[in-house]
Amino acid sequence: MALNIKPSADRVVIEAAQAEEKTASGLYIPDTAKEKPQKGTVVAVGPGKYAEQTGNLIPMAYKVGDVVLYGKYAGTEITHDGKEYLIMRESDIFAIL
């Protein structure tokens, strides 16, 4: 099913990865101690941002399907059709995995 959210300008919609259930050594993490994930999959991208000086469209560096790393408190959380998403600016994304 395609996501029917179209972000504006240089914004992307990300579906966050699930929080880790257990540590590398095999210990289970309780719900109260789980950290907010910093990795997710891009599910929608805006058209890009227009340069202030020239007015040219600066294309987005990310595309749908990219798995990315972003800041711990980046973006705005939304719920759409029962699923959780983050909307954030392109500049809040650190890297593609």
Image (cartoon, grey):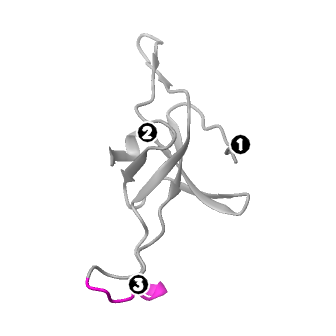
Q: Residues within 10 Å of mark 2 (few under 14, many from 20)?
A: many
In this figure, which residue is indicated by the disc labeled 3? Answer: 33
Location of residue 25 (image quadrant): bottom left
Q: Please give the residue where the numbered disc 2 appears in the rendered image.
A: 90
Residue 18 shows in the view: yes
> Mark 3 is on which residue type?
Ala
Residue 5 higher or lower than 75, as above or below: above
Pinpoint residue 19: horizontal percent, then vertical percent. 45, 72
Q: How far apart are the alpha carbons under marks 1 and 2?
A: 19 Å
Disc nearest the viewer among 1 and 2: 1
Label 3 to label 2: alpha-carbon separation: 29 Å
Residue at left offset 33%, top offset 89%: 27
In the foreground, 93 or 24: 24
Look at the magenta stretch and give its main secondary structure.
Answer: loop
Asked if residue 30 is among those painted magenta in the image, a careful observer would answer yes
Which numbered disc covers residue 47?
Answer: none
Disc 2 secondary structure class: helix
Task: Say which amino acid is labelled 1.
Answer: Asn
Is the residue under label 2 in contact with that under label 3 (CB below 8 Å)?
Answer: no
Q: Residues within 10 Å of mark 1 (few under 14, many from 20)?
A: few
- The residue that mark 1 highlights is 4
- Identify the residue shown where x is 41% and y is 84%: 33
- Pointer 3 local density, CA inside 10 Å: few below 14, some 14–19, many at least 20: few
> Label 2 is placed on what type of residue?
Glu
Q: Specify start and end residues of the magenta stretch as a single range.
A: 25-32
- Whether residue 74 is visible to the viewer of this picture, yes or no, is no
Instruction: Answer with mark 3 or mark 1, whichever residue precedes in sequence.
Output: 1
